[in-house]
């Protein structure tokens, strides 16, 4: 295969030159047009060097309070009281005489006398049998209530002696309810022993009243504490 050397002629070169010039003309027109459309640069704002004067606003007009419209009231009228009504007193009124009305006789029945019962014989109650009140009496002798054997060893060693007076309260069953020392021996141990021994050993016939019934009574006595020789 072989290639031939092509040589351009003068007409082709003229067309090419015209095309180049047209292209450059279009580019220049576009550039000028683009610069023209970019915009207009505004001139700078001048600086203010004067003095600002602020004028005051004019005062507002004062508001005057509205007064309510006066309402006219009708004048009050005073009415005078009416004079009292006066009636004429009647005179010469005929009075009809009172007629006698028939009276009826009312008979009140007289109650019959109530028959009284005849008094019967008077029954006098027979007097109740009376008894002479009797005090409490010991069944076992007071001498056996406390003996020398009742001395405690401590009272013997200390040689304690003395007389104790006592008062007993005897129940209706004959037993000693309580014992009270009315005069002390001078030793509390002997006083306590006196009441303790009598309450446990003494027996009584209960006291009786005027009807013969057994009642609560009292009994008084004494004990001589003496150390045997």
Image (cartoon, rainbow, N blue to C red):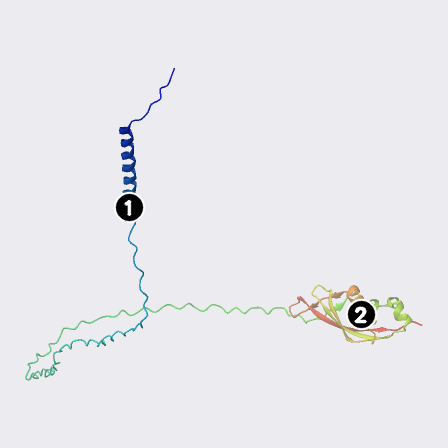
For the residue pair 27 and 62, the one nearer the viewer reads as 27
Q: Quadrant of the C terminus?
A: bottom right
* C-alpha separation, residue under disc 1 versus residue under disc 2: 156 Å
Whole-percent x, y for residue 214 in the image: 68, 66
Whole-percent x, y for residue 50 in the image: 31, 71
Q: Quadrant of residue 72?
A: bottom left
Q: Are marks 1 and 2 in contact (CB under 8 Å)?
A: no
Q: Residues within 10 Å of mark 1 (few under 14, many from 20)?
A: few
In the picture, measured across the screen, residue 136 lies left or right of residue 107, that is right
Q: Residues within 10 Å of mark 2 (few under 14, many from 20)?
A: some
| Residue in the image at 72% along x and 69% along y | 169
Whole-percent x, y for residue 6 in the image: 33, 23
Whole-percent x, y for residue 125 in the image: 56, 68
Count of labels shown?
2
Which residue matches tag 1?
32
For the residue pair 156 and 177, the one nearer the viewer reads as 156
For the residue pair 57 and 116, the one nearer the viewer reads as 57
| Residue in the image at 30% along x and 35% along y | 20
Q: Secondary structure at mark 1?
A: helix
Q: Quadrant of residue 223?
A: bottom right
In the image, farthest residue toward the top: 1
Which residue matches tag 2?
192
As drawn, 52 above or below 23: below
Which of the marked residues, 1 or 2, is nearer the chain's N terminus? 1
Tell me the mark number nearer the camera, choosing from 1 and 2: 1
């Amino acid at each position: 295969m072989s290639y031939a050397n092509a040589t351009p002629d003068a007409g082709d070169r003229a067309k090419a030159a015209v095309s180049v010039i047209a292209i450059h003309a279009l580019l220049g027109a576009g550039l000028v047009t683009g610069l023209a459309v970019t915009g207009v640069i505004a001139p700078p704002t001048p600086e203010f060097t004067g003095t600002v004067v602020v004028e005051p606003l004019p005062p507002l007009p004062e508001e005057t309070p509205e007064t309510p419209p006066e309402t006219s009231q009708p004048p009050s009228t005073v009415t005078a009281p009416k004079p009292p009504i006066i009636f004429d007193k009647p005179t010469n009124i005929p009075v009809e005489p009172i007629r006698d009305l028939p009276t009826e006789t009312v008979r009140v029945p007289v109650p019959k006398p109530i028959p009284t019962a005849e008094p019967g014989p008077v029954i006098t109650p027979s007097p109740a049998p009376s008894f002479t009140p009797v005090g409490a009496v010991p069944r076992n002798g007071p001498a056996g209530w406390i003996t020398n054997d009742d001395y405690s060893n401590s009272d013997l060693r200390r040689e304690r002696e003395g007389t104790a007076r006592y008062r007993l309260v005897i129940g209706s069953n004959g037993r000693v309810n309580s014992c009270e020392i009315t005069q002390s021996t001078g030793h509390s141990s002997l006083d306590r022993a006196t009441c303790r021994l009598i309450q446990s050993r003494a027996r009584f016939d209960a006291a009786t009243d005027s009807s013969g019934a057994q009642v609560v009574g009292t009994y008084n006595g004494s004990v001589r504490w003496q150390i045997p020789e």
